[in-house]
Amino acid sequence: MNIFSGLEKIVETNYPLAKHTWYGLGGPADYFIRPKTVKQLQDVVRRCNENKIPIYVLGFGSNLLISDEGLRAAVIKLEADAFTQTKFDGQKVTAGAGAELSKLVLTCVQKGLSGIEGLTGIPGSIGGAVRMNAGGNFGDIGSAVEFVTVMDIHGNIFEKKKPELVFDYRSVNITAKFIISAYMELNPSDPEQIMRTVKEMWIYKKNSQPLNTRNCGCIFKNPPPFLLSQESRGASAGSLIDRAGLKGLQIGGAVVSEKHANFIIAGKNCTGRDIMELIDTVKQRVKEQFDTDLELEIEIWK
Ligand SMILES: Cc1cc2nc3c(=O)[nH]c(=O)nc-3n(C[C@H](O)[C@H](O)[C@H](O)COP(=O)(O)OP(=O)(O)OC[C@H]3O[C@@H](n4cnc5c(N)ncnc54)[C@H](O)[C@@H]3O)c2cc1C
């Protein structure tokens, strides 16, 4: 019997994932599922559980490397209308997990609402941004989020609020499998001033990141200062990689960016394996030189 009988319209099999990742890499998933409603999502999750099918939740794939062999699993993407709405109520906004972060940033600018303009230039969905606590030197999404609506692996839906909800560097203490939406509180501000910040951020990104390449943002997290020796204290992952002389290092079609050493670019004919090997090499060389274990910021699904 077909595991997903009755749900054929939202379930595709042996589905290539590459087109759903920023790297443009990734083999097929056994099941690629795009539920149209929360109820359908619950149904899908129940059937996956009953049939012991592992579940992966995909946002916009801007922080992911998926193996060339693909996944013997169900990959679920919340891209239907039910998951992509944003609703404003004065300076508060509820954003669906599948909504696009950059669009929300721009809408907030137009409405003269400050709080998430520091996320300018970060690709991805609201769900992915919350899961990763996306951000940087100019702030992170966690500082604007008051609560999230989540769904656990059994289909139970509940809210998690601050102060119970705690955001940290590129992480959050959400254990539920699905983020359904996020409620944010913003601050009224001068739209022109916010726009100036947005423009400054774009110039900063343009000057420091290899835009217009296939990449996944920063590969590694910045190491906590206490793990570094006195002379390297406070160094970012990118600067350690640079100081190890690894800019331009290439394996197959994967190359360490000359512009930002913490970016690995997928060039022509690049495979997921090339990137994984380059990641391992970079880690090893940084370990040898600085006695520091770099931790991945991106996720690898294999
Ligand atoms: C050019 C470029 C620049 C970048 N710059 C930055 C930056 O400055 N700062 C920064 O923090 N990041 C940056 N990133 C990384 C990336 O954009 C962020 O991590 C982003 O938040 C990922 O969102 P996504 O929707 O693409 O998530 P995905 O990559 O699809 O998934 C990432 C994680 O989120 C989970 N996830 C996604 N949606 C949901 C959901 N609805 N429920 C539960 N879990 C979910 C996935 O399972 C996975 O664990 C950059 C990436 C690129 C390509």
Image: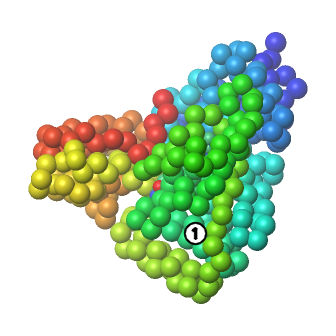
**Residue in view at x 46 percent, y 40 percent:** 299
Give the x, y percent position of residue 268: 41, 51
Q: Is residue 106 left or right of residue 244?
A: right
Residue that mark 1 sits on: 115
User: Seen in the image, is 18 located left or right of residue 44?
Assistant: left
Q: Foreground residue, 166 or 69?
A: 166
Residue 215 is situated, as x and y percent measured from the top left of the image, at 44, 54
Q: Residue furthest top?
A: 1
Residue 72 makes an appearance in the image: yes
Residue 62 at least partly seen? no
Using the image as rendered, state which of residue 108 and residue 297 is in the foreground.
Answer: 108
**Residue found at the very far right of the displayed protein:** 6
Residue beneath the point at 75% across and 29% down: 155
Q: How many marks?
A: 1
Q: Report the side of 54 relative to 275 (left or right).
A: right
Q: Residue at x 70, y 35 (%)?
A: 151
- Vertical side of 119 occupied by 297: above or below: above
Quadrant (top left/top right/bottom left/bottom right) for the N terminus: top right
- Place of residue 51 in the rendered image (x, y in percent of width and height, measured from the top left): 70, 15
Secondary structure category for the residue under label 1: loop
Nearer-the-camera pick, 228 or 219: 228
Query: What amino acid is at disc 1?
Result: Gly
Q: In x, y percent, where is residue 81? A: 81, 52
